[in-house]
């Protein structure tokens, strides 16, 4: 058995055991695979090394000497020592964490991300009443997205096949819209800006060597790389045209994060933005990040629904 597996088994055993265990009991319950019975001295040395490693890693392993003569020592990982400590979040802070967890499920090869976030919030007391079973938006993370984002960060180029044509792109921006990732950049073949939907790329996205970038030309070096998404646009159906007023500091943050937002009105102390809203829950989350610096102006039906949402947040929950 390799050391990593042995450490995992030891931690699992000590966490699950209702009582502290002696070294002999540990060897027996791990069936001799971790600390073989045939060589007690080597087994003991291996256990002592494992114990020291766990303590160095911060695992709260407790050593309990036998109270009478000290001849028998037991070991445990007490439940209270590994429990999540209350960080002291206020109701409003827990509500914000709840919305953040529900707003987006960024997924890799499995569906565990949102579940893990909800489990963590439940332990903190941040889930009360009814909670949506699904997030307001769902985007997958895969190797192609990782490769494209790495190229953006490093200023490199990528190659891929799209619509049966080989493309060489210096990517500048990844945008999430309507539940899909879009890749925007400078097409080194066409010598022009192009946008590609990531899930329509055929096969793998590959990083191109630096010499390819030099031969083809850098292309629009003044562009600022970014990754952004507008979760309120996710969904189907016709969007609602919403108007949101932000004070000057909040508007500066919003426009710095997403310079492409539509500005309907601008003055010295505020900015009015136009948003195409398909997902109202996602819009609520975005507005709440600005607290009282944001005001939903139109349309009336959306304003009414947002007010009802705020009232539901402030209403005390009744626990049966």
Image (tube, grey):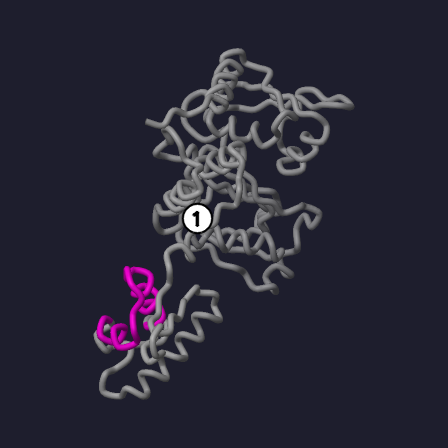
**Label 1 crowd bin: few (<14), some (14–19), many (20+), radius 10 Å:** some
Q: Is residue 298 visible?
A: yes
Q: Is residue 222 above or below residue 7?
A: above
For label 1, the residue is 141
Residue range corresponding to the magenta coloring: 6-29
Q: Is residue 32 above or below residue 126?
A: below
Residue 15 is one of the magenta-drawn residues: yes
| Residue 103 percent coordinates (x, y) | 46, 35
Q: For this view, does 119 lie left or right of residue 97?
A: left
Residue 300 is one of the magenta-drawn residues: no
Q: Nearer the viewer, residue 93 or 251?
A: 93
Q: For this view, does 219 lie left or right of residue 236?
A: right
Q: Nearer the viewer, residue 51 or 142?
A: 51
Residue located at (48% from left, 30% from top): 282
Residue located at (56% from left, 40% from top): 228
> Quadrant location of residue 179?
top left
Give the farthest residue toward the top.
Answer: 300
| Residue 132 percent coordinates (x, y) | 37, 31
Residue located at (49% from left, 53% from top): 146
Q: Nearer the viewer, residue 265 or 35?
A: 35
């Amino acid at each position: 058995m390799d050391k990593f597996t042995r450490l995992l088994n030891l931690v699992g055993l000590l966490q699950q055991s209702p009582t502290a265990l002696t070294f002999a009991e540990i060897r027996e319950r791990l069936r001799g695979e971790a600390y073989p019975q045939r060589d007690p001295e080597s087994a003991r040395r291996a256990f002592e090394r494992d114990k020291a490693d766990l303590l160095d890693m911060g695992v709260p392993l407790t050593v309990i000497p036998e109270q009478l003569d000290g001849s028998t020592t037991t070991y445990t990982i007490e439940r209270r020592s590994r429990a999540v400590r209350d960080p002291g979040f206020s109701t409003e802070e827990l509500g914000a964490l709840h919305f953040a967890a529900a707003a987006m499920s960024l997924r890799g090869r499995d569906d565990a991300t949102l579940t893990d976030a909800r489990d963590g919030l439940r332990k903190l007391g941040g889930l009360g009443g009814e909670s949506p079973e699904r997030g307001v938006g769902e985007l997958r993370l895969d190797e192609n997205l990782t490769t494209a984002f790495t190229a953006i960060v490093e200023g490199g180029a990528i190659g891929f096949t799209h619509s049966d044509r080989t493309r060489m792109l210096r990517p500048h921006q990844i945008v999430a819209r309507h539940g899909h990732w879009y890749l925007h950049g400078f097409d080194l073949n066409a010598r022009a800006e192009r946008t590609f939907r990531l899930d329509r790329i055929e096969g793998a996205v590959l990083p191109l060597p630096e010499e390819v970038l030099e031969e083809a030309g850098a292309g629009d070096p003044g562009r600022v790389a970014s990754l952004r998404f507008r979760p309120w646009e996710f969904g189907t159906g016709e969007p609602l045209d919403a108007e949101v007023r932000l004070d000057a500091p909040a508007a500066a943050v919003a426009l710095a994060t997403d310079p492409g937002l539509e500005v309907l009105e601008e003055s010295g102390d505020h900015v009015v933005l136009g948003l195409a809203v398909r997902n109202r829950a996602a819009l609520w989350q975005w507005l709440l990040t600005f607290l009282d610096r944001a005001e939903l102006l139109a349309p009336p039906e959306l304003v009414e629904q947002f007010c009802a949402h705020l009232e539901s947040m402030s209403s005390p929950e009744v626990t049966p």
